[in-house]
Structure formats: C-alpha cells, structure tokens
Image: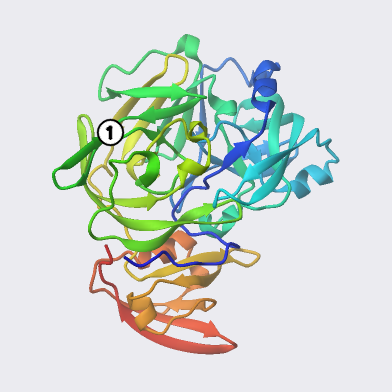
Amino acid sequence: MPAPNDLPAAFSFNYLRVTLLILFGGWACTAHAQLQDLQITGSKTRIDLPFQYTNGFIVVPVVFENWFPLNFIFDTGAEHTILSQREITDLLQLEYRRRFTLVGADLSREFYAYLVSGINLQAGAILAKNRSILVLEEDYLRLEDYTGVKIHGILGADFFRRFIIKINYRKRVISLYDPSAYRPPSEGYTRINVEFSKSKPYVFPEVVLRQGDTSTLKLLLDTGAALPLLINMDSDPGLVLPEHVIPSNLGAGLGGFLRGYKGKVPSLQLPPFRFSSVVTSYQDLQLGEIDSTQLDQRNGILGNEILRRFTVILDYIHEEAYLQPNKDYDDEFKVDRSGLLIIATGPTLRDYLIYSVLEDTPAQEAGLQTGDEIKRINWMPTTLLSLSGLIGRLQKPAGKKVRLVVKRNGKRIRTTFELRDLI
C-alpha cells in the first residue's frame, strides 16, 4: 500500500476540522474557577443564533470586545475558545498573561499561544463577560483557506455549556435554551446514548469496519469536523483498514496536514439510525508516543456530514442528547472524484489554488499541477463561485466531464477530464 503524500505544511485541506492538542498546564482549572458572567438581552429563555454552513463548518458571527465583528467556528469538540488572529489582541493592547505550548498535527513540533483574560464575547443576545481565551502566537490554523470565508477562531464549549443547545442544520439556526425553563422534546426526537467528558459529547455507534467485522466505537460528536467519520486506527488493536483505501490528506492542524487514508465503511449504526457506505477518514496518531488520555480514550470523530442530517439537541446540564432526522437524512455522502486538493486565497477568498494532486487520479492524468490557479470550471469563472461551490462540482457523479482553465507561470492552460470513483 502506498504511503500518504508528503506535502508541505503551510495550507489546509478542505474537509476536515482542525485537530488541536493543547498542553496548557493548570489553565483549565483557573478558567473554570473564575466567575464568567452571562448577560442575556431581555427576559428570554431561548436565544437563536443564525449561522453560515460553509464547506462543512458551522460559522457564527461574534462581536469581540464590544467592537470587532468576527467569525468563529462553532465547535462542540473544543473545550475552550481560541482566537487565531493575534493582531486583534495586539491592536487592543491586551495583556498576555501566560504562554502555553501547543502540539502540532504531527504530534512532534511545538507551537505557542497566550492566555488572555477579561474578554467580552457577544453572540446574538448573549454577552459572555470576563472570559479567558487562548490566542495563538501566529495564525497556525489558516482556517479561511479551507472554509473559503474569513474565520477568526473557534467558539468552544466554555461559551455554550451552560445551555441546552439545539442545532437546526436545515434552518441554519443554533438555539440556546435556559435550562430552568427547558423541557425535553416529546415527539419526533430520539434520545441516544451519550457521555459527556470535559464538556465534550461522545457517542457509541456500531461500525462495520469490514464485512463481518463490527465494533462499537467511542466517537467525539464534533460540530467542528467537516467530515462524516474519522477513525484513529491505533486507538484499538482491533481496528483495521478496509481493503480499498487511498492515501489522502485528512485535514489540517497546527503546523501541517493530518495524513492518512480515505475509504468507506459498509455501515454505521447509531440506534435506531443507520447509514451505509459512509465515507471515512483513517488516521494513525501514534498514540503510544503521547498520553492517550488527551483524547479521552476515543476512537475517532463523528462530524457534520452525518450530524447535518438531523436536528441535534445537546443537553449539557443533564448530559443527554437527542436526534431528529431531517430532509437531508438520505443524502448520498459526498466525495471528491477528481484527485484535487484546493484552497481559497486572495483578499476576497475567490482565488483558488491547486494545493496538491493525488496520484493515479483524473486530475493527475489531465496534467494538473500543484500551484495551478483555477480560473474557470465548465466555462464558469471561479470568481463567481464559493470554495464549497467549486468543490461541489468535483463531487458530481462518476463519468461527469470537467473542463478547467488554469493559470500556470502566467499562461492559461485548458484541460478536460472525467470524474471517477476513487474509493
């Protein structure tokens, strides 16, 4: 089996969440111990936060320090809130109280962040006062490259864990309920088996890894993950790769790509719900080299490409979770059929570069190269497309013909290829 491509670590693939392991000493205890007031406009028992769903990420508008309108990824897989744009706190001349070490995506390189206290964050009618957040020393995450919109950080569970939250993917609304006035849903919802640890929800689906090989996995229910399913292969000796996988870049973390494989599992069942032929990412984290308790003994991640098929209720107070299928429940799982990895660049994020071309794929056979700038796809200028719109055209059914115009070394090059199934 070939090894995953060894790509540079400057940019980010389009589908996967940021995986971040934080070694922050005693900060968690300090942040939990301090008084973190919440002010809610009016006497509301429910607050609706509209969001943008882009390229598999939930993006919510947040006002930072009563002044800066920013975009944050709403992330149930993150315990703490993170600001990736240090120039904002520099401009406000905020005090950096302490420097922390972060472990990169390769689990070896070190990066740095600062603790900043006394921050005010407002989302909709909620004002979270006197918060402590983590500010990256540099923008290691490059979130906008693979979302295609300006992103300034991650909104973690420290912001919303005092509420019962309902995520309506169809209406693009997150509702936060006052626990004292909330009543569990009585119709249309199914209560699922869930466990909360460090303010993060874990579910336990039955996954058919290969025909005749079924395992019950512990998966992080992660709204910060733009994928259906990720399995950490070395989290359990019984986990095995399926017969047909391809080397792939799974996503981006601090300082580089998460490399692994992509394939499909025949079945994933979160009783009573069942999905077939689930597109799956396989990652080897080399857990023997780190303290595996950092990952709460989990086997992987259940992400937005499954969660978006439901309205999701997470009750942090009573540690319960509910799902209600929506009209997207039976959607086919989307998968790239070109072999291209594309990032968004430029001041308006409407310039699209080929970051990598996978071997033995239609894109490679058509002569496309890393660094090519995509100018047109099927005669449409890419400046009229979002990143997710461009990628969606490369996920069309096998046999679909794609015509590209790319710019390389100042010259325009035309090429044509047919999409085909890669996994």
Say which amino acid is labelled 1.
Pro
The quadrant holding residue 129 is top right
Name the foreground residue: 283 vs 202: 283
Q: Is residue 193 left or right of residue 15?
A: left
User: Which residue is drawn at the image coordinates 72% and 30% (left, top)?
Assistant: 120
Relative height, residue 189 to residue 169 (above, below): above
Residue 287 in the image, given as x and y percentages of width and height? 46, 42
Residue 85 in the image, given as x and y percentages of width and height? 70, 48
Looking at this rendering, what residue extends furthest in the right direction? 93
Looking at this rendering, what residue extends furthest in the front direction? 288
Looking at this rendering, what residue extends furthest in the top direction? 180
The quadrant in which the C terminus is found is: bottom left
Name the foreground residue: 195 vs 224: 195
Local secondary structure at mark 1: loop
Name the foreground residue: 277 vs 73: 277
Q: Is residue 302 visible?
A: no
Q: Please, which colouring scheme is shown? A: rainbow
Q: Is residue 251 left or right of residue 416?
A: right
The residue pinned by badge 1 equals: 205
Q: Is residue 298 visible?
A: yes
The quadrant holding residue 207 is top left
Relative height, residue 249 to residue 367 (above, below): above
Residue 347 in the image, given as x and y percentages of width and height? 66, 65
Relative height, residue 31 to residue 365 (above, below): above
Q: In this view, does 225 lie to the left or right of 271?
A: right
Relative height, residue 183 to residue 336 (above, below): above
The quadrant holding residue 35 is top right
Q: In this view, does 138 lie to the left or right of 260?
A: right
The quadrant in which the N terminus is found is: bottom left
The local crowd at label 1, few if under 14, some if 14 to 19, many if 20 or more residues have their Cα within 10 Å, is: many
Name the foreground residue: 130 vs 383: 130
Residue 278 in the image, given as x and y percentages of width and height? 26, 49
